[in-house]
Amino acid sequence: MDTISLANLFKSLSEPVRLRIIWLLLEKGELCVCELVDALELSQSVVSRHLAYLRNNQLVSAKREGAWMYYKINPQTPIDMTALFQFMSQCSKSNPELAIDQERLNKNIVNQCNK
């Protein structure tokens, strides 16, 4: 897909797990799949499926380092989403579920993926 339509963008963000992933990536920059698995308390297959959906819709980019896959917000997203991401970050600060995700991430991030 060369460009992401607004409908696909909002469809991508309409799933709570994908929204949680995007928020963690916005907060931390780049994360390994194993870090997301621990933070979200979901299976690796579920997290990977949602990451693939986000990657297919050009919202995240991936890189492999050995056995590890790292994801970050795609800096070349066809739509300028700066304002949307700022809005999401602002709204998410008071969301208890996202705060728990971030707390788990901060607790478990200590070199678990040989970062």
Image (cartoon, grey):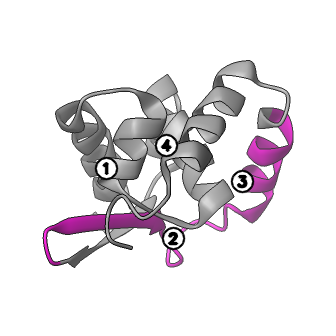
- The answer to if 71 sits in the magenta stretch is yes
Q: Provide the residue span drawn in magenta.
A: 66-91
Where does label 4 land, which residue? Answer: 21
Dot 3 amino acid type = Phe
Left of 107 or right of it: where is 111? left
Sequence order check, earlier mark of 2 and 1:
1
Residue at the spot x=54%, y=35% of the render?
A: 20
Where does label 3 land, which residue? Answer: 85
For numbered disc 2, what is the local secondary structure? loop
Q: Would you say residue 54 is visible in this rendering?
A: yes
Quick one: 82 or 47, which is closer to the camera? 47
Report how far apart the C-alphas of labels 1 and 3 lie in the structure.
Answer: 23 Å
* Location of residue 31 (image quadrant): bottom left
Sequence order check, earlier mark of 2 and 3:
2
The percent coordinates of residue 28 (x first, y second) are 61, 61
| Pair 2/3: label in front | 3
Q: Is residue 4 above or below residue 88?
A: below
Q: What is the number of callouts on the image?
A: 4
Q: Residue furthest top?
A: 96
Sequence order check, earlier mark of 2 and 4:
4
Quick one: 45 or 102, which is closer to the camera? 102
The percent coordinates of residue 65 (x first, y second) are 22, 79
How many residues crowd around disc 1 within 10 Å: few (fewer than 14), some, or many (20 or more)? many
| Pair 4/1: label in front | 1
On residue 34, the disc is 1
Report how far apart the C-alphas of labels 4 and 3 lie in the structure.
Answer: 12 Å
Where does label 2 land, which residue? Answer: 78
Report how far apart the C-alphas of labels 2 and 4 lie in the structure.
Answer: 19 Å
The percent coordinates of residue 75 (x first, y second) are 54, 77
